Amino acid sequence: MFKNQTLNVAPAAVMTAGTNGTFALKRAKGSVLQTLVALLFTWEDRIRQRQALREMDARALADMGITPSDVDYETNKPFWAA
């Protein structure tokens, strides 16, 4: 369900954890445009995943060990938040 369904190409950008707990976008080999496109695909994927999570029934959530409060927390995040 949460599998990344973006294009099957080498990633142009990766998210790395910073020392202060924040994430920084590091550009790999490629253009700024490739990095931007990869970021947009990531955001779109998060939107789809959170929508699918929001639509799951209580039994499926319980099978995965996810509580309704976990769902509320995750689905109320903005699309740019990991």
Image: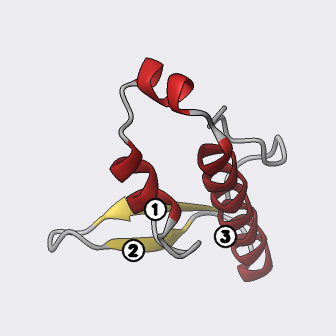
Circle 2 SS class: strand
Q: Distance between the residues labelled 2 and 1?
A: 6 Å
Q: What amino acid is labelled 1 in the image?
A: Met
Q: Residue furthest left?
A: 20
Q: What amino acid is labelled 2 in the image?
A: Ala
Circles 2 and 1: CB atoms closer than 8 Å? yes
Residue 52 to residue 36: above or below: above
Q: How far apart are marks 3 and 2 (CA)?
A: 12 Å
Rendered-image quadrant of the N terminus: top right
Q: Which of 67 and 41 is in front in this view?
A: 67
Q: Residue furthest front?
A: 58
Which mark, residue 24? 2
Which mark, residue 57? none
Residue ID for mark 3: 39
Residue ID for mark 1: 15
Circles 3 and 2: CB atoms closer than 8 Å? no
- Quarter of image, res 27: bottom right
Circles 3 and 1: CB atoms closer than 8 Å? no
Q: Position of residue 71 (x, y in %)?
A: 45, 50
Q: In terms of sequence position, does the residue under pointer 3 or pointer 1 come before the other?
A: 1
Circle 1 SS class: strand
Q: How far apart are marks 3 and 1 (CA)?
A: 10 Å
Q: Nearer the viewer, residue 31 or 25?
A: 25
Rendered-image quadrant of the C terminus: bottom left
Q: Residue at x 68, y 41 (%)?
A: 4
Count the marks: 3
Q: Where is residue 63 in the image (x, y as percent from the top left)?
A: 45, 18
- Quarter of image, res 35: bottom right
63 left or right of 50 in image: left
Q: In terms of sequence position, does the residue under pointer 2 or pointer 1 come before the other?
A: 1
